[in-house]
Structures are given as C-alpha cells and as structure tokens.
Amino acid sequence: AQSVSQHNHHVILSEAASLELGCNYSYGGTVNLFWYVQYPGQHLQLLLKYFSGDPLVKGIKGFEAEFIKSKFSFNLRKPSVQWSDTAEYFCAVNARRDSSYKLIFGSGTRLLVRP
Amino acid sequence: DTEVTQTPKHLVMGMTNKKSLKCEQHMGHRAMYWYKQKAKKPPELMFVYSYEKLSINESVPSRFSPECPNSSLLNLHLHALQPEDSALYLCASSQTGVITEAFFGQGTRLTVV
C-alpha cells in the first residue's frame, strides 16, 4: 500500500534560515507527489507537485522540492524562510484504489519561524 | 473560481442531533472528497465521489452518511455522533482520474457535546 512519512514533526527556525523538510514515500509504481501548506486558520493550499520530468520542482512562494527516486524521497526546501512561512506542511501521494484516486497525507511538519 | 465553499464554518451538535455539512464547487470537477482532520493530525480520507457516485468509503461508521446530489454539491449527513467525532471536516474536489491538484475548502469545525 502507498504511504507517506514525514520525520520532522516540529521545526523551529529563525528568519532567513534555510529550510528542508523530509518526505519519504513507499510505492513501487509511478508516483505523483505533492506538498500542501496549511496556514493557521486557512485551507490547505498546494505548494508544488511532481508528476514526471525534471525532478527539481519549483512551487509558489520560493519553495522547491527534489524528487529522488532511488531514495523514495521528495524533500521540500526553501533557501530563506520568512515569518509568514509559519504553517503546517503536508507531503502527499496520489494513490489508486480500483478506478478511483485519493490523496494520502503524511503526518505533517509544523514550522515555526521566529522573527 | 477555484474555490470550494463549505457551510457551516462551525457546528456544535448533541449526540442525538441530526445535522448536515455542505460543500459546493463550480470548477467542473467530477471528483469530490470528504476528509476528517483531528487537531495536529493530517487529513484522513473518509469518502470519494466520482461522477456523483460513491467510489471509496474508507470504512467510515454509518453515523456519517455522504450524499452527492449533483456535480457541484456534496453533503455529509451526521446522526448520533460521538464526542470523539469532533474534528475539522474538509471537503475537496479535483478532476477525475489521476489527481493533478485537489482544491480544499476551509472546513467545518464540528464539536459534538
């Protein structure tokens, strides 16, 4: 069965620090991977996604992620975080069941950026 | 319009009440989803509708009853809930087939007393 794991549950950084959040997935076939962000009191928003092609994916707000197939990883990065990046970040994988598809989320990483 | 609208935003209900959560989207998406999110936890899938038909039920108790009356609307009927059902209920929609992007509503925060 497909699954996603995020090992960093809480991350605290100062503004301008670099960010890397880990995401590992388990699936032997074609994978579609996502990073979603949930700002306090707001709905889940898509940051970026990987389907095929260039393994380095750029998303909104300066975020990027690298798909490394050999490591089953899809880590999220940002060179310099801002206070406004304080949020919860979820990695997700597109899973198939019969003829339907669903998103399976990792446990999430809560990021706190200190001014 | 890339919005998924959920009503109500907050709901408090007793264990003997019957209530409904509503979700609406006008993006032409034919796949719609209900997720449940407990505090500090990831969203957990409950139901998937594809072309207005229930395609995935993740072994959800029968006190939760989904309904998709048309391609824009998704309801979740609640009856005889337990306090442990208190959570944020999220609706989402996407194109059918491989999910290229799912759009989420802001959720209904449900408290069962």
Image: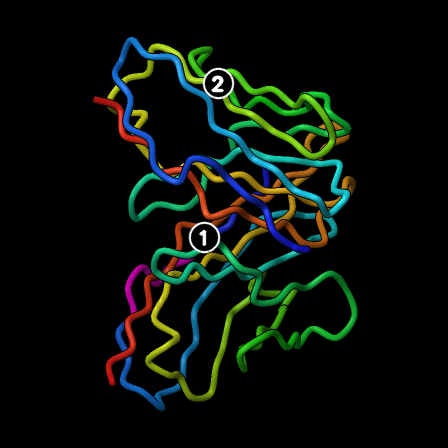
Up-down relation of residue B54 to residue A97 (above or below): above
Image marks 2 and 1: residues in contact by CB distance under 8 Å: no
- For the N terminus of chain B, the quadrant is bottom right
Which chain does the residue under circle 1 lie in?
A
Q: Residue at x 77, y 64 (%)?
A: A52
User: Which is more toward the observer, A45 or B26?
Assistant: B26
Reading the image, the residue beneath label 1 is: A5
Q: Secondary structure at mark 1?
A: strand
Q: Is residue B74 left or right of residue A106?
A: right
Relative to A62, is A9 on the left or the right?
Answer: left
Q: Quadrant of the C terminus of chain B?
A: top left
Residue A105 image position (x, y, % from top left): 50, 48
- Seen from the viewer's position, the closer of residues B10 and B85 is B10
Q: Amino acid at mark 2?
A: His
Question: At x 78% / y 41%, what residue is drawn?
Answer: B97
Q: Is residue A33 magenta?
A: no
Counting from the top left corner in percent of width and height, residue B103 is at 61, 50
Q: Quadrant of residue A53?
A: bottom right
Picture coordinates of residue A2, whole percent (x, y): 59, 42
- Which class describes the residues within 10 Å of circle 1: few (<14), some (14-19), or many (20+)? some
- Residue that numbered label 2 is attached to: B77
Residue at (72, 21) in percent of width and height: B53
Task: Return the residue nearer the eye: A7 or A81.
Answer: A81
* Amino acid carrying mark 1 in the image: Ser
Question: In the image, residue B52 lies at what x, y percent?
Answer: 73, 25
Taking A102 as reference, is B59 above or below it? above
Question: The disc numbered 2 marks a residue on which chain?
Answer: B
Q: Which contiguous range is marked in magenta? A: A5-11
Left of A83 or right of it: where is A21? Answer: right
